[in-house]
Amino acid sequence: MRQLRTTGQILLPTEDTAWVLHEDGCDPLRDSSRETRFAISNGFLGVRGAQAINRGATWATPLCTYVAGLFDTPDTIGAIPELIPAADWLQVGISLRGSSLAHHPGDISSHPLTLDMKRGALLTEFRQFDVPALSLRLRTLRLVSQCAREVGLQIVQIEIQEGEDEITLNASLESMNLGLITERLEPDVGVWRTRHSGKTLAMAASVTLRIDDEELPTTALGHFKWSWNWKLRPGQVISLERMVTVVRSDNGASDAGSVARQKLNIAKTLGWHEVFAEHEAAWSHRWERSDVEVNGDPVAQHALRFALYHLNSAANPGDDSVSIGARALTGPDYLGHVFWDTEIFLLPFYTLTWPEAAKALLMYRFHTLDGARAKAARMGWRGALYAWESADTGVEATPENVVGPDRQVVEVLSGKQEQHISADVAYAIWQYWRATGDEDFLRDAGAEILFETARFWSSRALLEPDGRCHIRGVIGPDEYHEDIDDNAFTNVMARWNIRRALDASALMRERWPQRWEQLSSRLGLGDPELQHWLDVADTLATGLDPETGLFEQFAGFHGLEQISLASYTGRSVPMDVVLGRKRTQESQIIKQADVVALLALLPEEFVSEAGGINFKFYEPRCGHGSSLSRPMHGLVAARLGYSELASRLFQESTAIDLADTHVAIAGGIHIAALGGVWQMAIFGFGGISLLDDGIAIDPKLPARWRSLKFSLMWRGRDLQIKINQNLNSINATLKCGKPMKLVVEGEPYELRFGLSLNLATKKAAGQITGQSFGGANV
Ligand code: IFM
């Protein structure tokens, strides 16, 4: 077969299948979940994996491109901000003898999609078999640059194998029904603005068509429309190259259209090969920092690469005015809103492998602090209560009502009551500070968040006649139970938040007395208030039974109906749908890790055997009604050495997106679950934990994992760790930076640059097995 001249190697995906996501065929019923899985993103632009070749009048889903931070609020009553899709810049239409190529039957017989996760590129292939006397092969490549995030690239290649025919090729950028107001439309530049949020979107595009390396002039031109017509001949290789640049402006200050055009000119001057090369190099750098290698379990290896691909795709260290929504930039669910998912499920990955991205995400919380202050004040408290669902400004964006599974309108209380979000933000800040030692961040932004969230909790928790402070009327991570009192997760996290704020105030007084003076006087924060915080922390009710070590999830939980999940084995819907809302609320069935989440985040709060006691109590009660649940349970199970259960939970967590096992994958990737998969591997099986003065490792690999290798960044150092189960050894190498402490299975060691630490593990990892304590889940 003739070689494609203009592609060279570029369209050949990475050979090692562990780096490739590949699906054959075409199933219209599952198209939308494929589009999610095969999405490409760089944290600024996200494009779903839909076909670019126009299928004519099929009313297929538009090829959504999302732009981080492009929020607006529709004109309807009770509307909330939502992420607006940008113009579909990838549309291509091909007509032969006047009818669309894709109209011919058989076009769906071979539609392989290949996501080269190593290079962040989506490849498609299409063969046309059934046009008499014509045989052609069509390949496409698409990427959004990981190096210059405003750039998108599309290559469409058509190789004529047999036959001669008239062909028309149209390329367009579809900007109808965007929900944006058109400000300017030129042949190759468009500028739109949002109706209410004051944002501008500009896109510039250039398209060229080459036949056998000769450029063919367009036969028709319109605004963002290009068309070519010519006679096909056997052996022709046609290459359509499209570059697009996208600019978002939040204040209209700059001429976004000109900026988009300038950036396009830069990309065009580079040429697409160079754009691709820079993108590939940026990906290679990300993989160097974040790859996790598993030996002995190819399925787990592939699933980890998939998780890492989407995690690395989701963040943008260059924009600290946005964060990562619950579906990242891969789908419309949750309208692009940001939840605790980012701080609790994603931040650990970024903090330890991409601190610049972690910092940008935390700075988003700093920029939205005023929104959090306003929410607390509106609800009658002091300090900062973050939005449960946050968009661009930090104003609460949770819908007031939704239609429940029984088609009844249900009031959504999380926007008012799911307040642990403030402690979750504080938690992520402190972990970032501990792991990076980033003094500028703590001094100039992080500390203020810690103070304002601590201030919120100290006003929120009220002293009652029993001599204890209580936090009443909240929702914990288990959202099945609303308006509850003294949720253990919320209260213990709040206490921890207050104590870290007190630590931060002591640290600031000592290290940066001037800044402390300035900040404490701006916030009106004096010693009496700090003393009050201390008193609240010391007297906050937590639901811990000191006799048994068991936390009661919230006041009254133990008195609720006990229902055995084992009786619902094989169900295909969440437990609240099976039981109905009311009975679920009156039962001990929980939606997701709650006390178990506390155990994952603050294991030091569970002394001696208390971790196992709480896990064994709560795991059988959990219906895993959220995609966040299994990874959190899996992490704790792995740490506790319940290796069999942890392995099952790992597999089930990875299946959520890869095997469509959870509802609504069509609406976007479950990015928090993917962050949880990384945490399970590193904190769970790898047994990594952060110390004040180093890192500890206590691995418990699943039986099948012969070895686990990963990299971490800690306070400016690059660390590589390999746990070898076959050899019962741990190898740690400091690739750069000053000596540091590594505590291996309880024994401290000094790790020095250039010297590898090679230690025999005390136990053969994986020999610790455990049982499942629970019934079967969905
Ligand atoms: O943040 C989660 C929540 O815990 C459960 N419902 C979905 C949200 C977004 O992922």
Image (cartoon, rainbow, N blue to C red):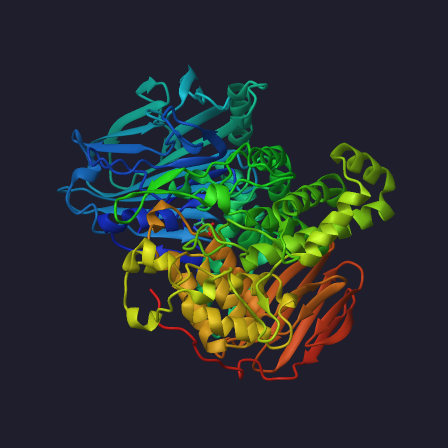
| Vertical position of residue 256 compared to residue 536: above or below | above
Q: Is residue 712 left or right of residue 65?
A: right
Instruction: Residue 305: give x, y in percent of width and height.
Output: 48, 59
Foreground: 447 or 61? Answer: 447
Residue at 55 percent across and 52 percent down: it is 346
Task: Note whether residue 436 is visible.
Answer: no
Instruction: Residue 319: give x, y in percent of width and height.
Output: 59, 36
Q: Is residue 460 left or right of residue 158?
A: right
- Displayed quadrant of residue 75: top left
Q: Residue furthest left?
A: 132
- Displayed quadrant of residue 399: top left
Foreground: 161 or 68? Answer: 68
Foreground: 464 or 476? Answer: 464
User: In what quadrant of the picture does the C terminus appear?
Assistant: bottom left
Residue at 48 percent across and 80 percent down: it is 770
Q: Is residue 537 left or right of residue 310?
A: right
Q: Is residue 297 left or right of residue 263?
A: left
Foreground: 151 or 649? Answer: 649
| Vertical position of residue 759 compared to residue 250: above or below | below
Residue at 45 percent across and 69 percent down: it is 619
